[in-house]
Amino acid sequence: MASKTILRVCSDIRCMKVRGATNIACTALQVIKGARNKKELTEMIALLMKTRPTEPLMRNGLRYVAYNVQQNFDFKKSLNFWADRYMTMSKFALERIAEIGAKRIVNKARIMTHCHATTVASILAKAKEQYKDFEVYVCETRPRLQGRITAKELAGYGIKVSYIIDSAKQTYINDMDLVLVGADALTAEGNIINKVGTSELAILAREADVDFGVAAELLKFDPITARGHPEPIEERDPGEVWDKPPKGVKVRNPAFDLTKRDLIDFIVTEEGVLSPHNILSTAYEKYPWLRR
Ligand code: RUB
């Protein structure tokens, strides 16, 4: 029988009170620490796995804990140990990405971003700490307007921010030096999955000859994509787009889209700045347990 806490956390993730790959994974790993035995842990993990389908950072973490906890005798102690270990890996990866990515932010740069990504915000915060002067164009990100979270956070760091509607991306892309986005999933082919609209931004960047960079932990690599499965793309409630559409109008609401590797100039990871072609080998080298 699932406890109220796990049901509340699952609902918070589904309705996006908790959102963004890093926050979702951290919240999921934290809540499973409340399991009192293996059976409860298995039930909790099953519920969390169903919340948002395009979240390998969470899925990898839950599988990592489930696999390792099995082999230990003191259940509680071992559960805390493995859950904390995954969260530490994720935190360390984020810190490395901030340090490495900040080096790609040059003084006076104009950068465009989409949605809200902890990785991107950490890179920009670090670059600002280094007294770099730059400006960020933030896309609104319909329908849930996560661009406002980014705009508010960056402005709080003292970064110059311009907030634009999604359809104004093309108007400003020629003024940019860099596009930098996060990712929910990295695939075996070197493609990335991020908030819907990201692939359009990549196409615009390519056309305008602006570098398109991604910042993502290798822990977001999804091993199912190496076994032939495509990364699932979540389709959300149409009511988020149009609550009462006229009769005969079907509303579609994909949460993410896939950006092809050929449009990606670099991916900032905890192992350095990589070409999309090296994602699979570097992810397996860094985290061999992802192969399981
Ligand atoms: C969030 C989104 C973010 C990634 C990466 O989508 O697409 O770019 O999750 O975020 P949503 P982070 O708002 O639908 O969850 O860098 O924080 O892991």
Image (cartoon, helix red, strand yellow):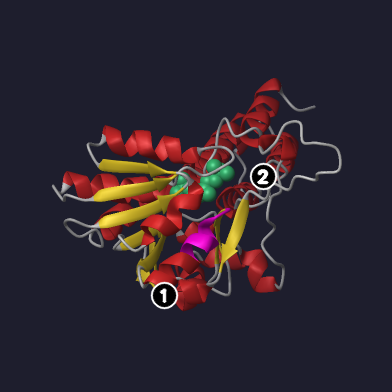
Q: Residue at x 28, y 60 (%)?
A: 100
* One can see residue 70 in this view: yes
Measured from the top left, where is residue 160 in percent x and y? 25, 42
User: Which numbered tag is attached to residue 52?
Assistant: 2
Residue 54 falls left or right of residue 159: right
Residue kind at label 2, given as amino acid type: Arg
Tell me if residue 153 is in the magenta stretch.
Answer: no
Element at label 1:
loop
In the depicted view, which residue is nearer to us: 64 or 180?
A: 180
x, y percent for residue 168: 45, 51
Label at residue 275: 1
Q: Nearer the viewer, residue 147 or 97?
A: 147
Q: Which residues are magenta?
A: 196-202
The residue under the point 75% across, 38% down is 43
Quadrant that contains the C terminus:
bottom right
Q: Is residue 219 above or below residue 164?
A: below
Q: State the SS at label 2.
A: loop
